[in-house]
Image (tube, coloured by chain):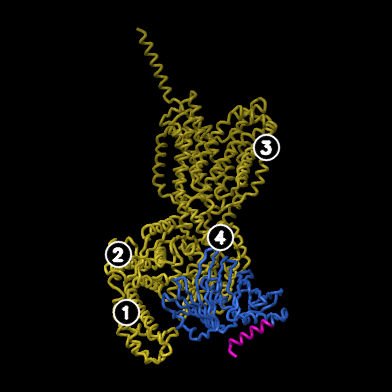
Chain colours: A blue, B yellow
């Protein structure tokens, strides 16, 4: 069985499990199911528009494409505005990160511990963008369960380098996708709220098409609208190299 | 006056009741009176300079900085860093604070192997603990200009936590909270508090302490003086009560209409006690004189009012005029002071005339004492006689003395210092002064200075201009640490590509900008969707003159050296003559900036012409011939490329790489080879098998290699020039060699760029007409505390002039009418004019600057001092118009009124001297100088004034010639009678 069909089966199994034994799942199982849903496709190519809204209500929009394979290969490419067109980020395992700057024709490594910094003016940290390693980094507890949702509280594990004090995650039982995540800062105050809506099934995978991340402290918001999503194109590993990062 | 006296007596009961009720009401108001020590609130809010300052503050997260400094042997130890971290996060939790910058929360742009790290200098969760890591952090932090002398002192003993306080919040409250937080996080370090919010907090404390200490002291002093004057309890209580009630009403009224106490209006209570008691004293002493005569008690009270009413009102009005002259002042707080001080004087005068008689009417009359009047102070009378003789014998000498004063003041006044800095309000040994001095010595001061730039901030031209301007700012004495998005971009460029300059393309800027986009530091530097930026710098609090010189040189640069319109030209597209002209201009601009850098780093021996000569002689990077050594460097870079992960065409075999390099070498030694020829060499020398799986590899590799060669050639050119300039310099301070090198390398990188930005006016119009170039516009504006200081400084001068002119003009009219003589008006103002000049001389001699408080002295001294003149002239006139000779009239006047003037002036001076015991420096000076001017104007009234009258034989006091005329008259009569006798 290919990785892809394994994931599909797993996702289906999870869905079945959810609908049949709702309420009986352990918190860690819920989190694992969420992560499995998120990581179900073998690879994914997304075109999206990203709008940044600042506290004055000023907006700026940029378009980008994200190429993702597995949990630890990602290539983010900016397509607009014109002056940053072609800027690319390559994120590999072990937190290796590279940026390509077309204006200089050069690739530079970015230090790994910027993971907790915001990604290029957005309200997402580099880590938020990855959104794939909840199970590894957090210990979940079930705070509440309603007819349609689980509410999990995630506390970072001691060894993780997570900069939040905790997350509260609302998981939709029907999709096993989080539709709202609250991020609390170190002093314990609400820092950011992420909502994921407009979930569509594309190539058999559930994909939220509208994602908002609001920094409630800075009153700054990032909105991502997915436009074009393609899964499982068998993207070769070669695409995730510095050499290909430069080719644009 | 008699009518008024009757009216007061008739309605004394209702008047008393109303007074008591009002006093209760205003006492209640008074207890709610708050102190406003915010210097910004003292300024007129509709002044465009003030408005811009507030707008900028609002937009960039607040314009006042509250600074906490921690001092210890070496701040790079785990416990100090932990304390800094804990304070930083707790300050950040305060909603009034928009941002905190400290070692544990500051942007760090750092080079890492083959890359860059844009993050925090110390991540909050990972404070280094081991000695080795701490030492590494220390070395790194102290090596960077972004931190050294900015948030950590160069010796590593002191660190700063700089909190940006939002505008429109109560700054003293924020400062209080911050101090509480600091006290709740214990540590070994010595703590200093600096910046305007803390200055305000300290100032508020001091104002309250001074009020609590000085008011009882002056009241006690007054009580003692009153007791010795009247020897009776009522003599103490009545004038004191009247003046205290008037103080309560005045301050209560301020609160009632919504005003707060400022450092200037805080002096009103002491002021009123010192000068407002005079009215009660005059009334009471008149009553006591009349009391000894027979008659009805009420009638005697009425007589007293009628007798002394007019002089009391006249002297009161002149004093009020002195205060009201402050309505011409620029500062809101000074205007408030003028209005409420004069209101206080009015109330003291009115209440003395109403309340004292009303209360007296209910008190039992004084029991007749056996010849109550004790003959006292005979020595005073004798002194007065000596003065009288002196004036009569040497009137010319005395007037000459007056002329000398004028002459001396002409020399002194231009040397009068001005000081408008808040630091100056505190005593030298006070906590806040020590903090400011430490801040100045280790961090170059804490006053933010800001320059607003409006334009397309992401435009490389605009950024280049900003960066150039910052380099100029660094040459201004007293000004340190200019910071803007421009130097962040340059810093990124340096850490990423090794050149500390702004890239020459919009894409280049945007690519780098990306790294800091959304970073919190950007909120302080850029606004309005990247159409406005601010350049911040700090200036020491040294003195107003330095601050103003800095403001002026900034304005001068902005007016002359910042081009309003710039052209963006791609050099390769230009016709040769135009290109030559543009390059010439560009070289001149670069030379200028190199000289700025040299000045900043203390490099000597690089003069502008010589630098320009070296740059021009070097020619252009594209035609340079590489030395063997330089060529080797290029070869190495090319070889490295094939081995790197980012290579478009990776080659494992060293021999193939060597072969390719050997094939390229002849191409790049003399000029920059084209992509096609590079591609040909690659195809020729690299076996096809190497790129079989990636047929496009050569197409990608050729331009990449060309880019590498181009950059290497340019670097060689710039490095060569850098070496020449460094050799040329006669002296470079050891510590700055590397920084200077980095700076000028960045400057000269401009010379090798493909694009040039030049001021449109610097190119001949013939060349211009053939160009289709993009142009950029940016406008600049200066704001910040220093420009406010300059405003204050100007206003201090203007206020001084305006209020003096106004006071003199009004008083002249009053006095000319009073004496029904133009000359009389002039002569009676002369002693006070001389007093003001003496005051300035005293200020120069003692080094006391003109500040927002000492500027008040002139008009106050005129208003109070002119009373002595009035009293003196009135008495002299009365005596002289009688049958006395001028000699006798003067003697009598001096023995009576003259004595009273001296006693009165001494009492008022003593009252003001109490201010010297306070802690607010300008108030100390104010108290001292008013005391001095009181004594001088009293002396002037009894010496210069009569001397002038005698010398000019002014007729408004009486007829000097009457003896002679009488003689003449008699002679005439004689003649007529003899003529009639035939």
Chain that bears disc 1: B
Q: Residue visible at 58% across and 31% down?
A: B309
Q: Are marks 1 and 4 on the same chain?
A: yes
Question: Which residue has dot 4 on it?
Answer: B166
Question: Which residue has dot 3 on it?
Answer: B18
Q: CA distance from mark 3 to mark 2?
A: 87 Å
- Depicted B814 relative to depicted A47: above or below: above
| Quadrant in which residue A181 is drawn | bottom right
| Residue A248 is a magenta residue | no
Chain that bears disc 4: B
Mark 2: secondary structure:
loop
- Depicted B882 relative to depicted B33: above or below: above
Residue A123 at x, y percent in the picture = 56, 71
Residue furthest toward the top? B982
Q: CA distance from mark 4 to mark 3?
A: 46 Å
Q: CA distance from mark 1 to mark 4?
A: 54 Å
Q: Nearer the viewer, residue B279 or B960?
A: B279
Kindly indicate whether the residue at mark 3 contacts the one at mark 1 (C-beta within 8 angstroms): no
Q: CA distance from mark 2 to mark 1?
A: 28 Å
Residue B428 at x, y percent in the picture = 52, 57
Question: Which residue has dot 2 on it?
Answer: B770
């Amino acid at each position: 069985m290919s990785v892809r069909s394994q994931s599909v089966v797993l996702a289906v199994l999870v869905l079945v499990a959810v609908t049949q034994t709702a309420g009986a799942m352990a918190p860690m199982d819920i989190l694992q199911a969420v992560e499995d849903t998120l990581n179900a496709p073998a690879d994914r190519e997304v075109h999206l528009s990203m709008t940044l809204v600042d506290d004055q209500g000023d907006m700026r929009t940029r378009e980008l494409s994200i190429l993702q394979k597995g949990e630890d290969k990602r290539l983010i490419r900016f397509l607009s505005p014109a002056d940053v067109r072609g800027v690319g980020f390559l994120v590999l395992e072990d937190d290796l990160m590279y940026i390509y700057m077309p204006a200089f024709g050069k690739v530079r490594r970015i230090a790994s511990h910027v993971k907790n910094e915001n990604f290029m003016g957005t309200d997402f940290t580099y880590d938020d963008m990855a959104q794939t390693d909840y199970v590894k980094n957090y210990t979940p507890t079930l705070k509440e369960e309603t007819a349609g949702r689980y509410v999990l509280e995630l506390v970072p594990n001691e060894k993780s380098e997570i900069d939040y004090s905790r997350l509260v995650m609302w998981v939709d039982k029907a999709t096993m996708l989080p539709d709202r995540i609250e991020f609390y800062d170190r002093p314990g105050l609400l820092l950011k709220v992420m909502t994921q809506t407009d979930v569509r099934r594309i190539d058999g995978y559930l994909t939220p098409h509208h994602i908002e991340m609001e920094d409630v402290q800075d009153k700054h918001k990032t909105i991502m609208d997915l436009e074009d999503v393609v899964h499982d194109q068998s993207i070769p590993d070669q695409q995730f190299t510095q050499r290909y990062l430069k080719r644009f | 006056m008699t009518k008024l006296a009757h009216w007061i007596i008739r309605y004394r009961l209702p008047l008393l009741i109303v007074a008591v009720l009002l006093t209760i009401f205003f006492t209640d108001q008074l207890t709610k009176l708050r102190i406003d020590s915010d210097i910004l609130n003292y300024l007129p809010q509709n002044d465009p300079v003030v408005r811009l300052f507030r707008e900028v503050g609002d937009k960039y997260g607040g314009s006042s900085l509250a600074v906490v400094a921690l001092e210890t042997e070496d701040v790079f130890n785990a416990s100090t860093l932990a304390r800094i971290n804990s304070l930083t996060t707790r300050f950040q939790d305060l909603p009034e604070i928009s941002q905190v910058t400290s070692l544990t929360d500051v942007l760090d742009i750092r080079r890492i192997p083959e890359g860059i790290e844009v993050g925090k200098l110390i991540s909050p969760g990972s404070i280094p603990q081991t000695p080795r890591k701490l030492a590494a952090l220390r070395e790194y932090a102290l090596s960077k200009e972004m931190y050294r002398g900015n948030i950590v002192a160069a010796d590593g003993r002191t660190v700063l936590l700089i909190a940006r306080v939002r505008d429109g919040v109560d700054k003293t409250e924020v400062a209080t909270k911050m101090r509480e937080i600091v006290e709740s996080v214990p540590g070994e370090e010595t703590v200093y508090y600096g910046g305007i919010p803390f200055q305000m907090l300290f100032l508020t404390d001091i104002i309250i302490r001074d009020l609590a200490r000085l008011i009882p002291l002056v009241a006690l002093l007054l009580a003692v003086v009153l007791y010795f004057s009247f020897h009776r309890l009522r003599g103490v209580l009545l004038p004191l009560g009247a003046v205290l009630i008037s103080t309560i009403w005045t301050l209560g009224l301020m609160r009632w209409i919504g005003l707060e106490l400022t450092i200037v209006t805080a002096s009103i209570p002491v002021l009123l006690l010192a000068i407002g008691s005079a009215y009660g004293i005059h009334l009471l002493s008149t009553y006591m004189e009349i009391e000894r005569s027979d008659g009805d008690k009420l009638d005697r009270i009425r007589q007293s009012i009628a007798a002394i009413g007019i002089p009391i009102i006249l002297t009161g009005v002149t004093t009020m005029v002195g205060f009201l002259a402050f309505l011409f002042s620029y500062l809101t707080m000074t205007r408030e002071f003028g209005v409420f001080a004069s209101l206080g004087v009015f109330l003291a005068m009115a209440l003395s005339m109403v309340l004292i008689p009303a209360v007296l009417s209910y008190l039992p009359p004084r029991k007749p004492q056996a010849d109550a009047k004790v003959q006292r102070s005979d020595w005073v009378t004798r002194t007065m006689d000596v003065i009288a003789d002196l004036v009569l014998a040497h009137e010319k000498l005395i007037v000459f003395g007056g002329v000398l004063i004028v002459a001396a003041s002409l020399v002194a006044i231009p040397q009068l210092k001005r000081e408008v800095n808040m630091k100056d309000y505190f005593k030298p040994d006070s906590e806040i002064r020590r903090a400011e001095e430490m801040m100045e010595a280790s961090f170059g001061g804490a006053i933010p200075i800001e320059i607003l730039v409006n334009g397309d901030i992401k435009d490389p031209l605009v950024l280049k201009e900003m960066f150039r301007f910052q380099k100029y700012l660094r040459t201004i004495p007293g000004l340190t640490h200019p910071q803007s998005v421009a130097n962040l971009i340059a810093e990124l460029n340096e850490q990423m590509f090794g050149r500390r300059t702004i890239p020459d393309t919009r894409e280049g800027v945007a690519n780098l900008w990306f790294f800091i986009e959304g970073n919190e530091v950007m909120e302080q530097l850029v606004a309005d969707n990247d159409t406005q930026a601010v350049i911040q710098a700090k200036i020491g609090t040294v003195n107003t003159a330095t601050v103003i010189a800095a403001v002026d040189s900034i304005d001068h640069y902005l007016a002359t050296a910042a081009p309003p319109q710039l052209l963006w030209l791609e050099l390769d597209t230009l016709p040769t003559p135009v290109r030559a002209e543009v390059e010439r201009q560009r070289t001149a601009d670069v030379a200028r900036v190199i000289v700025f850098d040299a000045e900043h780093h203390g490099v000597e021996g690089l003069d502008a012409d010589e630098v320009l000569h070296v740059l021009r002689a070097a020619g252009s990077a594209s035609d340079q011939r590489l030395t063997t050594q330089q060529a080797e460097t290029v070869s190495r870079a090319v070889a490295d490329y094939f081995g790197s992960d980012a290579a478009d065409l990776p080659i494992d075999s060293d021999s193939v790489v060597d072969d390719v390099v050997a094939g390229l070498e002849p191409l790049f030694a003399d000029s920059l080879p084209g992509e096609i020829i590079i591609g040909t060499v690659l195809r020729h020398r690299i076996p096809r098998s190497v790129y079989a799986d990636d047929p496009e590899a050569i197409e990608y590799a050729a331009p990449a290699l060309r880019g590498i060669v181009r950059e290497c050639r340019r670097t060689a050119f710039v490095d060569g020039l850098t070496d020449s300039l460094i050799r040329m310099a006669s002296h470079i301070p050891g510590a700055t060699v590397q920084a200077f090198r980095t700076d000028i390398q960045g400057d000269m990188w401009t010379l090798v760029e493909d694009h040039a930005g030049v001021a449109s006016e610097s190119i001949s119009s013939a060349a211009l007409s053939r160009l289709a170039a993009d142009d950029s516009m940016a406008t600049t504006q200066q704001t910040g505390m220093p420009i406010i200081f300059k405003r204050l400084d100007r206003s201090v001068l203007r206020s001084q002039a305006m209020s003096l002119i106004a006071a003199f003009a009004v008083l002249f009219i009053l006095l000319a009418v009073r004496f029904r003589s133009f000359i009389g008006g002039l002569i009676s103002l002369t002693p006070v004019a001389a007093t003001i000049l003496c005051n300035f001389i005293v200020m120069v001699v003692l080094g006391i600057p003109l500040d927002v408080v000492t500027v008040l002295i002139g008009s106050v001294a005129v208003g109070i001092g002119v009373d002595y003149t009035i009293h003196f002239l009135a008495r002299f006139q009365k005596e002289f118009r009688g049958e006395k000779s001028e000699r006798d009239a003067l003697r009598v006047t001096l023995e009576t009124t003259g004595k009273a003037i001296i006693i009165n002036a001494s009492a008022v001076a003593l009252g003001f001297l109490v201010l010297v015991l306070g802690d607010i420096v300008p108030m100390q000076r104010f108290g001292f100088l008013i005391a001095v001017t009181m004594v001088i104007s009293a002396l002037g009234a009894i010496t210069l004034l009569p001397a002038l009258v005698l010398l000019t034989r002014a007729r408004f006091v009486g007829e000097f010639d009457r003896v002679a005329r009488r003689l003449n008259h008699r002679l005439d009569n004689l003649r007529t009678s003899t003529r009639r006798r035939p």
